[in-house]
Image: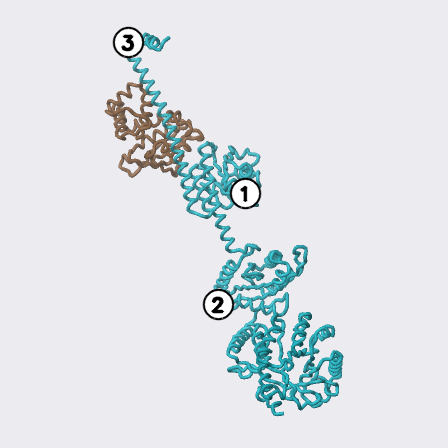
Amino acid sequence: MSVGGALASLRHFAPPLSDDPVALLARAERRVARERAARLEAEAIAEQGLRRLYDSQQRLLLLQRITDGANQTTDTHTALRVAVTEICRQMDWAFGNALLVTNGGSAVAGCGVWYASDPEAVFSFAEASRSVQFDAGVGLPGRILTDVRPHWVDNVTLDPNFPRRDVAVRCGLAAACAFPVMVGDDVAGVLEFFARRLIIPDDDLLGILGQIGTQLGRVIERDRARRGLIHDALHDAMTRLPNRTLFMQRATNAFARIMADDQRCMAVIVVDLDGFKAVNDSFGHQAGDALLIDVARRMEASIAAAEAAAIRHGASWRATLARVGGDEFNILLDDIDDSDAIRRLASTIHQCLTAPSVLGGTHVRCQASIGIAFSDDHYSDVEQMLRDADLAMYRAKSQGRGRTVTFTEQLGVEVRLRTHVEQELRQAIAERQFVLHYQPIVSMDAPDEVCGFEALIRWNHPTRGLLLPIEFITIAEETGLILFIGDWVLREACAQAAAWHLRTGGMSMPFVSINISPQQFLQPEFVERVHVVLMETGIAPASVRLEVTEGAAIMDPVRTASILEEIRRWGVKTSLDDFGTGFSSLSYLQSMPFDALKIDRSFVAAMSADGKSRGIVQAILDLAKTMDMTVIAEGIETIEQEELLQRMGCTMGQGFRYGRAENDADAFRRFGVC
Amino acid sequence: MKGVVFNLLEQAVTDAHGDDTWIDLLEEADVGGAYTSLGSYPDSEMIALVGAAANKLDLQAADVLRWFGRAAMPLLAERYHPFFVGHVSARSFVLSVNDIIHPEVRKLYSGAGCPHFHFSQDADQRLVIGYQSPRQMCHLAHGFVEGAADHYRESVAIEHLSCMLEGDALCRLAVRWLP
């Protein structure tokens, strides 16, 4: 049938309109009923749509509020709190709780962020949830961690995997849902919610919760990055210990607390490794780094053990170990009540370093020098305390390896004095405040004849007058200034002797004996320095005697031997100073070509009364004779000593019997006139 | 006033008295009469309808409102069943009005002005419902409470402790559950 045909048949289908009013009315009423039914259905559809729209808008607003909250903070807990609260309010859920991953991602734990619409009603459940921990797969949060997707529990009281069931029942909680907070592909946290009635999941809600999880994940990511940056800025990358910045922050805070409270005390400890540079030089920087890490771990462990022991005994001090420099560590001890405990801690640190570290199969033992400073009324800031602990550490270092020194006022006075003298010494070098005095050395055969002089330094101090070496040489050696002073002495003595020789026209050529300090002798360019001085002053090398102490000579016997040989080739003489007081070993004496031995004044002084000393002097003389060396006896004061030494065959002598050290003009008069 | 209230009145009147009565009322009250649940209509139209009914029945407007409230409750139960489940008594149902029913109403009609009820309990263990509305329809509320009691097969006695229609600042209904 064609379409036209069908339409034509429809025309026939339309019944003839009745003119019966009852039928017409009934027809109109049926139409009204249908219209009403259609209206009601339309209203129902519209209402349903409006409800959905409303819910959807509310959820978008919820997401908006949580996103705003998340954007306004860098703190994970704040963002989680906003989310948990808003979700509970929006969804009319009774309790919400946030958990964060822990144990390297194998568990989640409550982080103290929760919301309850009626806190009193769910108090015990909140208590059971706020810091609870679930391993992966355990309980509702553990399931999220394992499955990485939202979970719904219609009735927690019937759920076999719900450890908090009993307390949930007591609080009237029935249904639960939870969803993950994601950072990338990893679960960073879980939000869980509980309601008194059924929670019906729908796709829309799941979508919103997923987006909330992502937003919160971004906050966690930002928070982690921020914490990471702060951590990196405040910690040493190698040992992971606090660095100087963090140490100073904590030390400054601790100091502020003791300033505010008279009863509180604190201490700072400076730990400096002994011989670390040698490890670095011998084994390389990598080994050095490994050693530092090992040492840091050991110290950390021993400090932690000491802290724990202190807590057991009722003390409450806290320690911060920091790496503040290459091989330097600081320890802050806050709120201490027992200074002995701190000294014991220092011993513990020494002990923990006794066992050697194994670096690439080699055993390396590293010790430390420790300086301690305790808080005290006279400190006005923590930097002063640290300076004093540093001074104590340097004092400990000067006493040898593995020592501890506690700063005292006495030490402070000494150090300040020393610092003052050091400054004056620098000024003295710049302003040429030193002078040389010359003590005559005579031949024992003819004691009236001066054959040479020992050049002795004096400091013409602007306020204290003429100072003897004993008052400043130690400081000069410790500060390294001895190199400048020694150099000046060498040049000045040679120049003076050359001038004398010139004045006598070569008629009298007394030698000049010059003390060489160990540091000077050990300088790589020592030989070169001597050569330059000889050239510049024009002194006859044979009238120069260089006195070297045993200590300096045996530091590196091979090198000493080669220096002596070199110098002797030019004709310069060498003496071994203070012989008998040090090692006085025959084996090294044999390998080192000294021209002369100087017998220390202590043997000479004891010789008359003491047969033993006389025996030693005789032995030295015999030894020198065997080795074809000259002997110069020091400190001859009496005629008895002179006669004795003459009889024993001593070659030369010096002492008050022949003259004290005197200025160059007086010294010149001794030989210039003869 | 929301169209749904007019729809409920229409249904209550029609169920009780037939279609024609409703049409009579509309014409008597001289109101538009085309009401959809999605729309809002002037309060005056409801007052006019109630007035017309009172006139016709020779009753007080208050009586008509009470009747309407009570008669509307089964219709509401049919139309909004989820609000009624979960309650075992009229008391808990009435108490849920502010927190559950009104929010739902607002979902449908943004800006719907729902009356807020203040609930308390007096010395005689009566539930006191405080009510303040510019519409002054405390008798409709009265009827709703009675209807709710009917729904949960309870009976109540209601006393108007104060009434805005009497010049009081607010209406207070005391509801006693009868054994």
Query: Seen in the image, is B114 located left or right of residue A576?
Result: left
Using the image, name the chain to which the residue with label 1 belongs. Answer: A
Disc 3 designates what residue?
A: A17
Pointer 1: residues within 10 angstroms few (<14), some, or many (20+)? many
Identify the disc placed on residue A380.
2
Q: Secondary structure at mark 3?
A: loop
Q: Is residue A419 visible in this depiction of the protein?
A: yes
Q: Secondary structure at mark 2?
A: loop
Earlier in the chain: of badge 2 and badge 3, it is: 3
Residues at discs 2 and 1 both on one chain? yes
- The chain that appears cyan in the image is A
Residues at discs 1 and 3 both on one chain? yes
Disc 1 designates what residue?
A: A108
- Report how far apart the C-alphas of labels 2 and 3 lie in the structure: 114 Å
Q: Quadrant of residue A663?
A: bottom right
Q: Amino acid at mark 1?
A: Val
Taking depth in this image into account, of A538 and B146 the one nearest to the observer is A538
Using the image, name the chain to which the residue with label 2 belongs. Answer: A
Earlier in the chain: of badge 2 and badge 1, it is: 1
- The chain that appears brown in the image is B
Q: Where residue B149 sits: x, y (%)?
A: 39, 29
Quadrant containing the N terminus of chain A in the rendered view: top left
Q: Residue at x 64, y 66 (%)?
A: A401
Earlier in the chain: of badge 1 and badge 3, it is: 3
